[in-house]
Amino acid sequence: MNLFLCWFMIHLATNPARLLSLDVFRGIAITAMILVNNPGSWDYIYPPLKHAKWHGCTPTDLIFPFFLFIVGVAMALSLSKYTPENRPTKIVYQRIIQRTLILFFLGLFLALLSLTLDALFNSKPFDISTLRIMGVLQRIALCYFFASLIVLNFSQKKQWLIAAIILIGYWLALQFIPVPGYGTGNLSANGESTLIAYLDRLILTPKHLLKPNPGFDPEGLLSTLTALVNVLIGYFTGSYLKQNTQPQNQTCIQLIITGLSCLIIGHLWSYLFPLNKQLWTSSYVLYTSGWALLLLAALYYIIEIRNARKWAKFFEIMGLNAIFLFVGSGIVARFLIKTHIGTGEKTATTYTWIYQNLFLPWAGPLNGSLLFALCTIIFWFIILYFMYQKKWFFKI
């Protein structure tokens, strides 16, 4: 754990002006991530807590784009003072690069940890040539970096134009650029026939992908381009909230209208270009951004306008240390999955042993699996609550 904590600055809270609804939104997203990533058994999961097998979008498929949207909103609160006329200083770019590298290498660290634990506890050879290069944190890092460059160097109109060009260009590229051996427009259910997979196999090589065979990674390089638009939409939203002078009720209505518009356009586009998280299709970008806008509007109304804040304390605490929770939960889960309890035929991973002995006997397979995930949330909340009381906040 100390290896990654040293990469963070410990910020003692000084009660800076914050958008509480954004912290709560972040807390909801990270809590949902813990819930869906930690079932007691992957064979027993309630349908809303599963990802879509290929095309489609479940509530679980909203979590990752929500994170990217939140990154964009937060970026607006910190970078919107800079314009092509009011140029940022060299230090600003240095901080952006620093944050990008820390995020990216934290993702690589988690991938490297998996290889190391397999070598230590599962008698697998330690082969750095199979290290997965891309991942969730790596994608967030790249999206943050390129979105920052765009908003710092282009006018607002050009930012919108870039977002539109990416979404339309990506759609046309996947439809009409031929992939050797597969032709055009083949969005098969394993991803190998897509331009995304072809470029990843060409640039990253199959060994460094999540699925070496057939050679596909759901956080691939090309699909990171469209994920970047989720960040930009978040940035446009944050800029609107910061610069808007309308009454708060009007602000909330505008967020709802924009969110519904994104939902409708994304849904209609899905008839031509299906909603697909693993391909991160253009329709998926707009559809998930629509839901993000609606959830932010609801939180903005409840928290900022109605001033109903007590209920949100749990999620605020979870959201204030989201990066610590993301990495910390990833480390603990890997240890539980890679280590074992028992011998011979009775051996099981520590993770499975806990589920089978503490949850399954009295809660049953399905509810026991859900209860395991809920207890994982409670476990991390206790840790984060202690950190909150001590005013320990880990920021990149």
Image: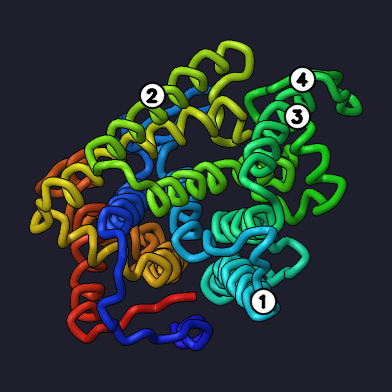
Q: What element carries label 1?
A: loop
- Packing grade of label 4 (10 A; few <14, some 14-19, many >=20) is some
Mark 2 highlights which residue? 260
Q: Which amino acid does label 1 sit on?
A: Thr
| Sequence-earlier tag: 1 or 4 | 1
Q: What residue type is labelled 2?
A: Leu
Q: Nearer the viewer, mark 4 or mark 2?
A: 2
| Sequence-earlier tag: 2 or 3 | 3
Q: What residue type is labelled 3?
A: Gly
Q: Which of marks 3 and 1 is in front?
A: 1
Q: Which amino acid does label 4 sit on?
A: Gln
- Seen in the picture, residue 94 relative to 108 is either above or below; the reply is below
Choose between 18 and 58: the one closer to the eye. Answer: 18
* Gap between marks 4 and 2 measured at Cα: 27 Å
Q: In the rendered view, does 43 fall on the left or right side of 177?
A: left
| Sequence-earlier tag: 3 or 1 | 1
The image shows residue 3 at horizontal and vertical percentages of 51, 85
Q: Which of marks 1 and 4 is in front?
A: 1
| Sequence-earlier tag: 1 or 2 | 1
Q: What element carries label 2?
A: helix
Q: What element carries label 3?
A: helix
